[in-house]
Image: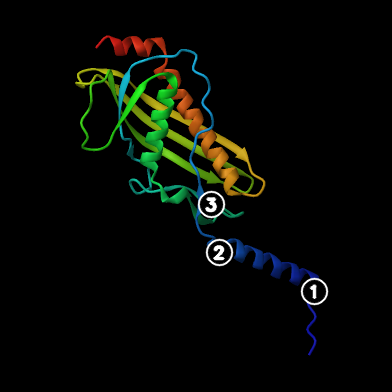
Amino acid sequence: MTITRSLPALISICIIGTFFISCLPMGAMTVTVKPAPFKPVKRKVSGKLALMELTDNRRGTDTGVCYIGLQRNGVGVPHGNITITEGKKVVPVLTKDLASALRNAGYTVDIITPGGSIPQCDAVISGEILMFWNEMSRHYTWHDVELNLSVTTPDKSRTIWSGTIQSRIKNKMSWGSAKEHEETINQAWAEALDKVLNVFSSQEFTQSMKTN
């Protein structure tokens, strides 16, 4: 028996099939978090800082997980996580990058893990990660960063500076590849760290730190 299908029916079958395939889970995408090169600081500084390991207070995520975003298909259905390469956790990766940025400005920085003692220093930095998340639509990917930072004297008797650092980068995508997501993530992270450097290399900040 020969079955003849009309062209509209065949088109409908193709559309339904494409939609079904696009909604299937595709697995995790891994990216390397490494900020783009820092902008040159306008004013080199000096001093010794103790950086407490950041805390992960991102909304909707488990503390310390390696997830930093979601892949979505053309109709917005999630089909896989975006994770840091080799399952590295967010907290130590971002803490290390923050320390590198501060060293780039001229500071000596010691990272203090939970339970560690604070060495002799000029100031103590503590902070929380409120957002570090990558999203996408059909043609775009964007990444949001939000950090709360607080700088105190070593004895915590005075707050030298506190504030929120935010950044967002949105880029057009061609294929939705890991490289495209990675570039956007690292551009947003570099922008946030550049904002940190603008604060920590300012004359106002260094003068406040020296008045301990």
Viewer-proximal residue, 49 or 146? Answer: 49
Viewer-proximal residue, 56 or 117? Answer: 117
Q: At 53% from the left edge and 52% from the top edge, which residue is drawn?
A: 71
Query: Which of pointers 3 and 1 indicates the residue nearer the eye?
Result: 3
Q: Which residue is mark 2?
A: 24
C-alpha distance separating marks 1 and 2: 28 Å
Q: Earlier in the sequence, mark 3 or mark 2?
A: 2
- Is residue 63 shown left or right of residue 8? left
C-alpha distance separating marks 3 and 2: 12 Å
Q: At 74% from the left edge and 67% from the top edge, which residue is drawn?
A: 11
Residue 46 in the image, given as x and y percentages of width and height: 37, 15
Q: Secondary structure at mark 2?
A: loop
Instruction: Evaluate whether residue 117 shows in this view.
Output: yes
Instruction: Evaluate whether residue 84 shows in this view.
Output: no
Q: Which residue is mark 1?
A: 6
For the N terminus, the quadrant is: bottom right
